[in-house]
Amino acid sequence: STMESGLRFVLLSGFCVCLCIGTPISITYNQQGKPIEPLRYGFNDVLGPIVNLSFSDPSLTKLASTLRIGGLRHPGGTVANYWNWTAGDYVTCNSSVPKCGKYDRRNKRIPKGVFTPSNWNRGIAKHIVGTVFDLNVLTLSVRQALDALNTLAASGNNVTHLELGNEFYFPKTYGWRFPNSKVYMREMKQVIKHARRLFPAAKIAAVARGPTPHQPNWDPDMQPYSDLFDAVTQHDYSCSQPDIQHLPYGDQLSYVMGYSQAMVDRIGAYFASTFPSHEIWQTEFNWAIREPPFGPHAEHTGIHAGFHLARMLAVHEYDNWKVLFLHTLATQRRVSEFTVALVPELADEPDAIRISGDAQVFAHLSHIALNKAATVTWHKANISNCPTLGVSVLNTTLECLQVGVFEQQYMANNNTVLHYIIINRCNQNLTATLDATATLSSQVIDLMTTVYYATDPGGFAPFPKNTTQFPWPAPLKPVVSQVANVTTTNPKVSLEALSFNFIQISPSSSF
């Protein structure tokens, strides 16, 4: 039946049976779980420099709390290189500085002093877990950068993560100040020393290149200075039209759904050899697909949700990967290829927010992982008898399934609930047997499955009336099934082709 909201809901008396052939896939998980890193559930925000709503505007605070965002990078990426925390405005610089003055037109009407760290602390910071503050060390002098740190220290923010600029490995744009990483690191010594004095518990990240073709000597030249910083930042916009244009449509979907895992593994291996003792902060990532079959973005938010979900699952495999921020949280006026949410241009209009399918799926996972009523741990999945993708991704053969397991322990009733998040990126239906024996003491379980589809165009929609009940019914149209009072701790589930599945297993009658 179809509810008024558009959510398709089915109540079953038995398990879904998948009409496919072959040995059923078996999925178990490691019993030793790992704590959740909240900053893996976040966004590069550009609030202030581009989005001109105040940090306390109801649209932004509602967006942050309703999506249950773990972290934000502030004030964003490229714009951070031209921003002055002390003034809460763009810096004044001459025309010889590339891009300086490019971004500030829309904020000319905003009085100075609105977009300051103090107002950040009084506003949106109260609705997220943490902030990665990105310091302008490009168009501010070292002395001015130290003053900016003083402003941040006096703002009341709990500063736990500090990033030293953005993408300096592009010499055409930034070579006038940092022709190489040796110059960058020498200038950062005084900045880091001052930051350590002000924020002794904070982690500090330097700009790394990662496995990209830009400035091949940037990272090797930074290695002798590696004791100065705790983390490296890395950005990735590498899934693009040329990667998929030669493939049939079904394989294009499979490729994009598998890309995040393959790229995360490539980045993880790279930093294991270059900065093995440092944290990885991916403070920006997205794809670079702007044209059909998966562009324009507003018409293909299902596949983008799968791309983002796969990245969030993949980074959990790396203990040192502490930050993962999608670009970008919100835009105004129009939907770009990166828009997660569309927020109003006028203040005090939270009902005007429109969210993408990406935001819908992100919120589903973040409400599981960042559940405030439970102790949540992530568990590595072990998959056997799984077929492989019919297309190679970054010269890697991947299995059809990507799986993450989250365990919630509720102190109030001593219940444990399992969540299997399973992406089927193959063009075939599969069957899998899930293990719940080690977690659930009850031999009678309830099973709830939510299925999203990569082929769902999605689009944008308002928040649902009840934002605490998952799944949300729009803009993607998930299918929900429930099975109650089943005597098994090894349920068998069907996994439709090109789908991402949220499977909740709980003691009977604990929905």
Image (cartoon, grey):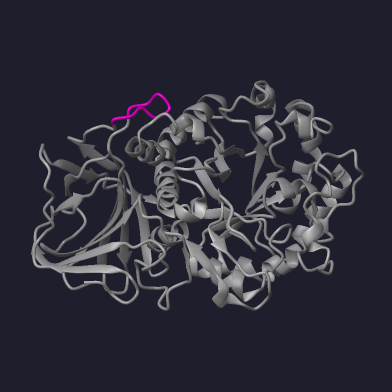
Percent of width and height locating residue 409: 31, 63
Asked if the stretch drawn in magenta spans residue 328, the answer is no
The quadrant where residue 6 appears: bottom left
Residue positioned 39% across, 30% down in the render = 393
Tell me the magenta residue range: 390-397
Residue positioned 60% across, 67% down in the render = 343
- Residue 25 vs residue 181, the one in the foreground: 25
| Residue 356 appears in the picture as rendered | yes
Q: Is residue 349 left or right of residue 390?
A: right
- Residue 248 vs residue 395, the one in the foreground: 248
Q: Is residue 430 left or right of residue 419?
A: left
Residue lying farthest to the right in this orientation: 94
> Is residue 176 shown above or below 103?
above
The quadrant where residue 368 appears: bottom left
Percent of width and height locating residue 252: 38, 37
- Residue 295 vs residue 395, the one in the foreground: 295
- Residue 19 vs residue 189, the one in the foreground: 19
The image quadrant where one finds the N terminus is bottom left
> Is residue 345 shown above or below 45?
below
Q: Is residue 295 left or right of residue 14?
A: right
Percent of width and height locating residue 230: 62, 39
| Residue 38 appears in the picture as rendered | no
- Main SS, magenta residues: loop
Residue positioned 75% across, 59% down in the render = 153
The image quadrant where one finds the C terminus is bottom left
Percent of width and height locating residue 471: 34, 66
Q: Is residue 387 left or right of residue 108?
A: left
Residue positioned 12% across, 43% down in the render = 20
The quadrant where residue 256 appears: top left
Asked if the stretch drawn in magenta spans residue 394, the answer is yes
